[in-house]
Amino acid sequence: MSKGLHIPEELLDKIEYILDHLAEKARTDCILLADISGQLISVQGFMEEGTPAIVAALAAGDVAAMAELSNRIGERDPHGSFFHEGETKSIYLHNISGSFILIVIFRTETPIGLVRLFAKRAVEQLVPLTKEFEQVMGPPKTYNPDEFSKGITQELEDTFPTN
Amino acid sequence: MFINWRLREINLKIVYYGPSLSGKTTSLQYIHSRTNPERRGELVSLKTREDRTLYFDYMQFEMGAISGLKPRFNIYTVPGQVYYRGTRKLVLKGVDGLVFVADSQIRRLHENVEAIKDLYEDLVELGFSPGELPIVLQCNKRDLPEIMPVQSIKEQLGLNGIPTFESVALEGIGVLDGLKSIVNSVVTKARGNIN
């Protein structure tokens, strides 16, 4: 198992640049990048309703279910995309290399073809970047492992206060 | 585990696993109700018409920054029914720690054993080594008659030596103790990986 996903700042800059470009070209409301387990990595734009972390978690479930459905009908490529067309807003999901998910939320006035075209281009740019994610980068200078462990106890008390 | 160095956030995933109707969703609902409202997100449940968990339940809570890092915990439950095994495996992806919620009733022993078998098989398929993942055992429904002694449950499930908590999830008894234990174990393990 890997030691987890560590994303350095310079990589986030590149990701955000790509997502910004996609948002502008495809006229989207909000774009999210999450890993396949539902952890939110980056958000571009804003959501009028809903919480990005929850959208990421649900999208991960959706993508996983769709990959499994594809397998059941004999499809072996887990890197597909699909979208839900709503009355006012639609969602486009793209599975990136089976490891990450691009989530695009856009108004129904925006043609799906436009979103697909620019999302595909964005994914092509994101693929090499996502491969760099696994690199373990150094912790912040303020990080002290002993302090971190000790601090959790107090934080647990503050998070779950006794009445 | 996902660390965003720009935001100084460490995201950790904890999954409540166990057989159907053992109390996973009830535990999460209690946790949500007891979490400081300023630190918790919405509780999301994907349920069937019969109010059974279809996909998963999900909530997120965060803590204040510690040593320059802000921990965020994503808590999931899995659907317990046998035919949702595929979904359980999906939810286990990227997991950092597990709470196995066992039903303490004698007549549910078989379901507990099957669930732990499924869990280990899924973990192996997902690339985890035995013993690699922090696990806590929550023996639920301790208020009911005809329940197994905790030690017997541990032995039957092969979970000797792991932190164990007796609970009555409907009343919240023991639920937070189990959560705090897994949070500490997960953080201890994550600490080693950050360092």
Image (cartoon, helix red, strand yellow):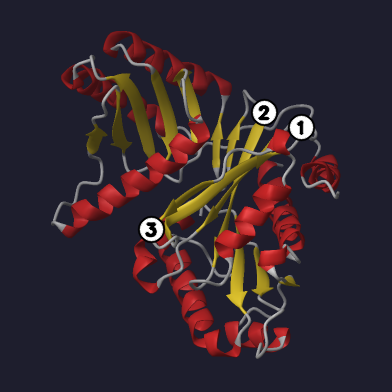
- Can residue B133 be spotted in the picture? no
As shown in the figure, which amino acid type bears the numbered disc 3?
Answer: Thr
Considering only order in the chain, which callout, 1 or 2, is on the residue closer to the N terminus? 2
Query: Numbered disc 1: what chain?
Result: B
Question: In terms of image quadrants, where is residue B65?
Answer: top right
| Dot in front, 1 or 3 | 3
User: Looking at the picture, which amino acid does disc 2 mark?
Assistant: Arg
The tag earlier along the polypeptide, 2 or 3, is 2
Callout 2 touching callout 1 (CB < 8 Å): yes
Name the element at disc 2: loop
Residue behind mark 1: B65
Tell me which amino acid carries mark 1.
Ala
Q: Where is residue B138, by image quadrant?
A: bottom right
Q: CA distance from mark 2 to mark 1?
A: 8 Å
- For the point 75% across and 40% down, the residue is B36
Chain designation of label 2: B
Measured along the vertical axis of the image, is residue B122 above or below residue A145? below
Front residue of A4 and B66: B66
Give the structural element (helix, strand or loop) at label 1: loop
Report crowding for label 1: few under 14, some 14 to 19, many 20 or more residues within 10 A (C-alpha).
some
* Quadrant (top left/top right/bottom left/bottom right) for the N terminus of chain B: top right
Element carrying mark 3: loop
**Residue A35, how many percent across, how many down?**
44, 39
The residue under the point 32% across, 36% down is A96
Quote the CA–CA distance across marks 2 and 3: 38 Å
Q: Is residue B172 above or below residue A4?
A: below
- Name the spot of residue B55 as percent of width and height, x first: 41, 55
Q: Estimate the spatial distance between the alpha carbons at disc 1 and disc 3, rounded to whole Å.
A: 38 Å
